[in-house]
Amino acid sequence: MPPPFHSVTALAETLQENWQNYRGSGDFADFVGCTVALNGLSEHLLRRHMPGLARLAQELENMALATFSDSTQHPLAPDLSNSIERKLVHLLAELRHHEEPPPPCRRQADSATATATATDTWARERNVLIVAAADNSCSRPLSEQLAFLGFPPSIVSWSAWSGPTTGRQAPLAIICLPDTPGAYSAATIAAITELRTRFPTSHIYCLEVPAELEHIVQLQRAGADTCVPVASGCTDIVVRLLDLTRDEEPEVQRVLVVEDSPTASTVVRRALSQHGIDSLAVADPRRLIEAAASYRPDAILMDMHMPFCSGVEATAALRQMCEYQALPIIYLSSESDVVQQVEALRLGGDQFLTKPINPVVLAAVVKTKIARYREMRHSGQHDSLTRLLNHTTAKTRIGKLVADTLPDGRLTVAMLDIDNFKSVNDTYGHPVGDQVIRNLAWLLRGRLRNSDLIGRYGGEEFIVALPDTNLNSAIAQLDRIRKDFSALPHAHGTGAIYATFSCGVAALVDYPSATSLIGAADDALLQAKRGGRNRVEAASVAGAQVKETAGGEL
């Protein structure tokens, strides 16, 4: 697979070609192609965590959309056309300036036997710039924690920051802390604007932002991408950075189009395809339930008027099934009666789009609905404290990993438990205990591969599954993490504490079922606890023979 940024470059080249075609022809259809290409480029830049460049693309897209609904304005007047072209040239120049893809980071490699040292743990640049007042108490411990987790930080004070500097490499992220308690001053907001101009590809986080709309809007206007409220604390930024570095290919968005008109169906599917959305067309609503079960869409585009039944009737029937109660359903119709529209929404629809449909608006609505739907599903599958997979989801996915790996593949499962955790809660309080749990979660996410499974099994216990990994490699890797965790300081009100964990590891080759594999790792964890804690213990092969004789599956 080519490096991710190459696809951005390809989108930019398509945009440039479409614009040149429009300048030559003045045809509105060519302008539609430009606008759609701009929309796709904006979204792709956001997915690739390049918010500054995405802003440039969105500004250009908004200029195009202002004339999109009136084809009589085309060809555009020379002054407007030249203004768009100047912005387009600037955007393309910025894209070319940043088109060299970074080397892949170690944790994206699929080799489970790769070793990591203090100097080569991170092959990809993950540097972070912290901008804070010289006396800010949060900046130093935050810097130490980021360095430990593989994000080399540098700290610059607001007073020393004099705007754009030359020669500085664009950081992965810029973390801003307020220069005065509880607020960002006008000078600081101006400096954030300069930071955004200098580093268009960096993600700017503003921490300790007061919960005031006016303040948040000012920071957003200055160029902040994420405003983290005061209640979240400084350490919340770590999990956000870990999310930022997970450069996984996005899951394909799937839309089921229920439309009896072949022409209308073709137009809708073409608009979706131009935005990278997969679709399946169903002409007969009687096939709706069957198609939904096999295709598993993220949203449904439903025509209001069809031969067998109306779209409202079809939606009401689908809502009877629990697995489709939250699935977004968007009505497509030429119906202009507001009463009918409200009734359709009351009976199960999520939105109403009137034909003819602007393809950019259609894609924007579909993608927004899908994002909300997936976010809801994600919340149901992940632990709220650590954002790792929850107990049920982790066990289910390990069962699938086992099924996919058998009979000849390699898979290792580990159970981890923080040592003497009750005494941490009793001595320092539950907030400090929660921070210790979060720190281990972050360390696991930072040290393991994107393809590895990490879940919070319950309380202070974690479960890890390492595909394509033998027992010895897994033990070596987890032992490095154990040593790192024992050296990680967990800050609290009067200083820092240290914690350790014990770990049990079992391999699928010895325990060829999900139940026996998880059980063996848990038994090995108990052995590690009994053996003195702060150690990694392998499940015994003799124990495997006993368990296989007993049998049983989840």
Image (cartoon, helix red, strand yellow):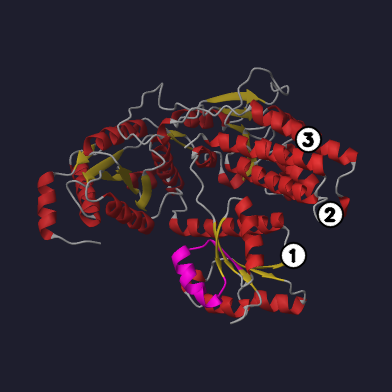
> Label 1, on which residue?
356
Residue at label 3? Answer: 87
User: Which residue is most to the front?
Assistant: 25
Marks 3/1: CA–CA distance: 30 Å
Residue at (67, 55) in percent of width and height: 364
Characterize the local packing of mark 2: few (<14), some (14-19) or many (20 or more) Cα atoms within 10 angstroms. some
Q: Between disc 3 and disc 2, whose residue precedes?
A: 2
Residue 514, position in %: x, y?
A: 25, 55
Number of other residues with Cα within 10 Å of mark 1, as a class: few under 14, some 14 to 19, many 20 or more? few
Q: Is residue 218 visible?
A: no
Look at the image and give the residue range highlighted in magenta: 283-301
Q: Which residue is mark 2?
A: 71
Amino acid type, mark 2: Ser
Q: What amino acid type should be assigned to the residue bearing mark 3?
A: Lys
* Name of the residue lying farthest toward the top: 167
Image quarter hosting the C terminus: bottom left
Q: Amino acid at mark 1?
A: Pro
Q: Is residue 461 left or right of residue 220?
A: left
Residue at 34% x, 58% y is: 396
- What element does badge 1 sit on? loop
| Residue in the foreground of this view, choosing between 59 and 459 | 59
- The disc, 3 or 1, on the residue closer to the chain's N-terminal end is 3
Q: What secondary structure is marked by label 3?
A: helix
